[in-house]
Image (cartoon, rainbow, N blue to C red):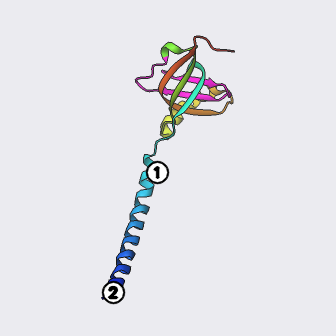
């Protein structure tokens, strides 16, 4: 009797192992697409972008950040101020990036570039240090 139970246990273990392995392999690529990027916080001088409705910020480490504000994060009234913005790296299509490229090239002046979907803004100073 214990020998029969032992044989059944081996088969049950094998079926569970194969089944769970296949399920995890199937789910892994889907989970990767749903991951959100980490929250970033950047401080610098907020400037009006060349693109209609665009804004950018040059951070203390001389990096150009193209900003895309959420509805709750109004940037218009803070242009020319030193601000700290919080957000995540947006997922932009190739067409969106292509449309922005000419403006970004003029704004970056050779600086390293990143995009930021802004969810919050805090004024650090009413002016920008030069």
Q: Which residue is mark 2?
A: 2
* Circle 1 SS class: helix
Percent position (x, y) of residue 10?
38, 80
Check disc 2 and report its element: helix, strand or loop. Answer: helix
- What number is the disc on residue 32? 1
Residue at (35% x, 88% y) in the render: 3
Comparing 31 with 51, the one in front is 31
Q: Quadrant of residue 128?
A: top right
Residue 26, image x, y percentages: 40, 61
Q: Position of residue 44 (x, y in %)?
A: 61, 22
Q: Is residue 95 left or right of residue 13?
A: right
Quadrant assignment, res 100:
top right
Residues in magenta?
50-75
Tell me: 60 left or right of 25: right
Q: Residue at x 36, y 74 (%)?
A: 15
- Disc marking residue 44: none
- Label 2 crowd (10 A; few <14 / some 14-19 / many >=20): few
Quadrant for residue 35, please give it: top left
């Amino acid at each position: 009797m214990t020998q029969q139970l032992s044989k059944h246990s081996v088969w049950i273990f094998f079926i569970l192992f194969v089944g769970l392995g296949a399920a995890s392999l199937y789910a892994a690529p889907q989970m990767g697409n749903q991951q959100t990027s980490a929250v970033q916080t950047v401080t610098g001088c907020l400037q009006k972008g060349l693109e209609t409705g665009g804004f950018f910020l040059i951070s203390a480490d001389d990096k150009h950040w193209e900003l895309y504000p959420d509805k709750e994060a109004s940037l218009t009234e803070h242009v020319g101020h030193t601000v700290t913005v919080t957000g995540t790296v947006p997922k932009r299509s190739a067409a969106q990036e292509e449309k922005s490229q000419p403006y970004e090239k003029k704004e970056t002046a050779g600086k390293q570039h990143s995009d930021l979907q802004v969810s919050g803004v805090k004024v650090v100073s009413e002016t920008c240090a030069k």
